Image (cartoon, helix red, strand yellow):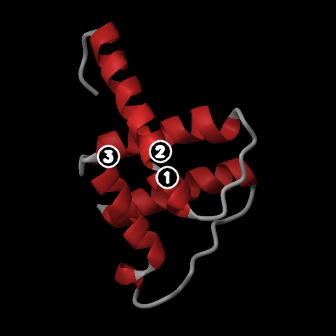
Amino acid sequence: ADQEILGYLCSKYEQLYGHSFSFSLKGSPSRCDEMFAIKKIKIVLNSDNPKFIKDYIDWVFKSKLESKSVKIVSLKYFMTPGICNEFKHFHISYQSDNNSVW
């Protein structure tokens, strides 16, 4: 599932910036920096639910990158604890306001 999450994140990146994300290509593909970033995002969000991770990626692109013209150069931006915590607060508020589960 980590490969699919990375692929989804890269497709969102390409849609926003108009070019593909450049990989570090260090080590084997399953141990590269980008796969480590996906694992770290899951740890910081305290979730390995692919739907929750996808919602997080969508939220970051919509609320942090698209609206503010932020240019990211690495996936570490997605591991920022403050951004992850903000999303979790947003997610909890959304659930309680809509009485639904994502």
Q: Looking at the image, which residue is at 68% across and 38% down?
A: 66
Question: Who's the residue at 62% across and 54% down the image?
Answer: 13
- Which quadrant of the structure image shows residue 42? bottom left
Query: Which quarter of the image is occupied by the N terminus?
Result: bottom left
Give the quarter of the figure containing the C terminus: top left
Which one is in front, 77 or 12?
Answer: 77
**Where is mark 2, residue-wise?**
57
Question: Mark 2 or mark 1: which is in front?
Answer: 1
Q: CA distance from mark 2 to mark 3?
A: 11 Å
Amino acid type at mark 1 = Phe
**x%, y% of residue 82?**
46, 41
**In the image: residue 93, left or right of residue 74:** left
Q: List the residue tagged with mark 3.
A: 45
Residue that mark 1 sits on: 78
Question: In the figure, 39 relative to 29: above or below?
Answer: above
- Please name the amino acid that badge 3 sits on: Leu
Q: Nearer the viewer, residue 62 or 87?
A: 87
Amino acid type at circle 2 is Ile
Q: Residue at x 31, y 22 (%)?
A: 92
Precedes in sequence: disc 2 or disc 3: 3
Q: Is residue 78 visible?
A: yes
**SS for callout 1:** helix
Q: Earlier in the sequence, mark 2 or mark 1?
A: 2
